[in-house]
């Protein structure tokens, strides 16, 4: 069973690190924005290749950025750039964890908390073994569950 259009947009926000209540609020703003111009059946099954979802994603970015700027600048500052068009995004160091959502679809989370530790390790590694400006450094993180 696929996600509905509403659930798909909700996952677009929560998958980028936004808390569910804030994501619901932003989707409410998106609904107001498209009302009268784009017909959306929010409870219909999402067609992942549809022009509708592409259009909604394009509209979602500016709405999310405005909401972040007006409400939670510091808390969401690390995900704000994810909502910019590709040509305006700044390069950033990110660690992603992918798992399955309640319907079995892959969902990726940005984990900001350990970035500082990874940067420190990279500084140490590159100080001992200098690399060129264009070098790509791969970082692997194993995550376990304590019992």
Image (spheres, rainbow, N blue to C red):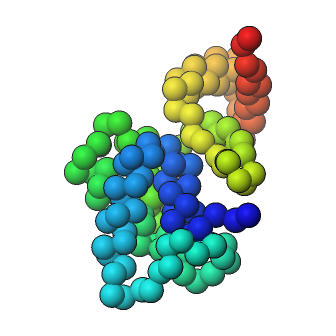
Residue 111 in view (yes/no):
yes
145 horizontally vs 15: left or right: right
Q: Residue at x 37, y 42 (%)?
A: 77
140 over 65 or under it: above or below = above
Residue 132 in view (yes/no):
no
Q: Residue at x 69, y 20 (%)?
A: 125
98 over 13 or under it: above or below = above
Q: Residue at x 63, y 81 (%)?
A: 50
Number of numbered discs overlaid on the protein picture: 0
Instruction: State the image quarter where residue 132 is shown.
Output: top right
Which one is nearer the viewer's eye here, 81 or 61?
61
Q: Residue at x 44, y 42 (%)?
A: 19
Q: Quadrant of the C terminus?
A: top right
Q: Quadrant of the N terminus?
A: bottom right
Q: Residue furthest left?
A: 70
Instruction: State the image quarter where residue 140 is shown.
Output: top right
29 over 112 or under it: above or below = below
68 horizontally vs 110: left or right: left
Q: Residue 43, image x and y in percent?
A: 54, 71
Q: Residue 90, image x and y in percent?
A: 48, 52
Q: Residue furthest top?
A: 147
Q: Residue 59, image x and y in percent?
A: 41, 72
Which one is nearer the viewer's eye here, 20 or 84?
20
């Amino acid at each position: 069973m696929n996600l509905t259009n509403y659930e798909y947009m909700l996952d677009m926000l929560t998958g980028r690190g936004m808390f569910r209540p804030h994501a619901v609020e932003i989707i409410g703003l998106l609904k107001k924005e498209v009302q009268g111009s784009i017909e959306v059946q929010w409870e219909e099954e999402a067609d992942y290749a549809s022009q509708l979802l592409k259009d909604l994603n394009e509209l979602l970015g500016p709405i999310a950025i405005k909401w972040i700027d007006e409400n939670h600048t510091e808390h969401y500052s690390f995900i704000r750039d994810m909502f910019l068009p590709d040509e305006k995004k700044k390069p950033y160091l990110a660690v992603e964890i992918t798992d399955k959502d309640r319907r079995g679809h892959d969902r990726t989370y940005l984990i900001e908390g350990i970035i500082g530790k990874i940067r420190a390790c990279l500084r140490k590694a590159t100080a001992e073994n200098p690399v060129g400006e264009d070098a790509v450094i791969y970082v692997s993180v194993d995550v376990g569950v304590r019992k």
